[in-house]
Image (cartoon, rainbow, N blue to C red):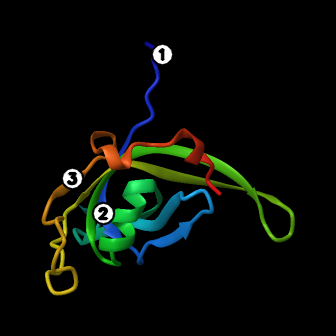
Amino acid sequence: MSGTVNKVILIGNLGKDPEIRHFENGGVLASFPLATSESYTDRQTGEKKEHTDWHDVVLWRGLAEVAEKYLHKGDKIYVEGKLKKRSYQDREGLTRYAVEIVGEELTMLSRVDAEQHPKSPYRKEQTINPSTLEEFKPNPEDESPF
């Protein structure tokens, strides 16, 4: 046992429709911001307040295909995965860093619009875990973020 853990669990709402990228090798990537909120009472004023945090979520392969077909801005989801930090060069040539949640399991908590997706097998609280579905088995060669 290695003695380390990298696990993230979030329940939140999509800040926008997923951005989808299709790669020449057949890989698919979905990315979107996810909002999580917490409410609290200000001790000095007694006023109820809410704080929202934004998280960058990326999904690969089968989960990305599910996101492309069924996720929309405002949808509530449960996502389980790991934190990943990556670096990239911006337009000025400076090195920038991004911390993302790489989703490994997804549960849609919003009801799928039956008119928009009449044949959808995904309904309220449908869990999709690619490691248990043959067609969604991970391909280690697809691990490159771009």
State which quadrant residue 63 falls in: bottom left
Q: Which residue is mark 2?
A: 12
Q: Residues within 10 Å of mark 1 (few under 14, many from 20)?
A: few
Is disc 3 placed on a helix, strand or loop?
strand
Q: Which residue is mark 1?
A: 2
Q: In the rendered structure, which disc, 3 or 2, sits on the residue that comes first in sequence?
A: 2
Q: In terms of depth relative to the viewer, which is nearer, 63 or 98?
A: 63
Q: In the rendered structure, which disc, 1 or 2, sits on the residue that comes first in sequence?
A: 1
User: What's the amino acid at mark 1?
Assistant: Ser
Q: Which residue is mark 3?
A: 127
User: What's the amino acid at mark 3?
Assistant: Thr
State which quadrant residue 114 falls in: bottom left
Marks 3/2: CA–CA distance: 15 Å
Q: Position of residue 97 (x, y in %)?
A: 68, 54
* Identity of the residue drawn at 86% across and 69% down: 92
Q: Nearer the viewer, mark 1 or mark 2?
A: 1
Is disc 2 placed on a helix, strand or loop?
strand
User: What's the amino acid at mark 2?
Assistant: Gly
Q: Residues within 10 Å of mark 2 (few under 14, many from 20)?
A: many
29 with respect to 70 (left or right)? right
State which quadrant residue 78 falls in: bottom left
Marks 1/2: CA–CA distance: 31 Å
63 with respect to 22 (left or right)? left
Q: Position of residue 124 (x, y in %)?
A: 13, 65
Q: Is residue 40 visible?
A: yes
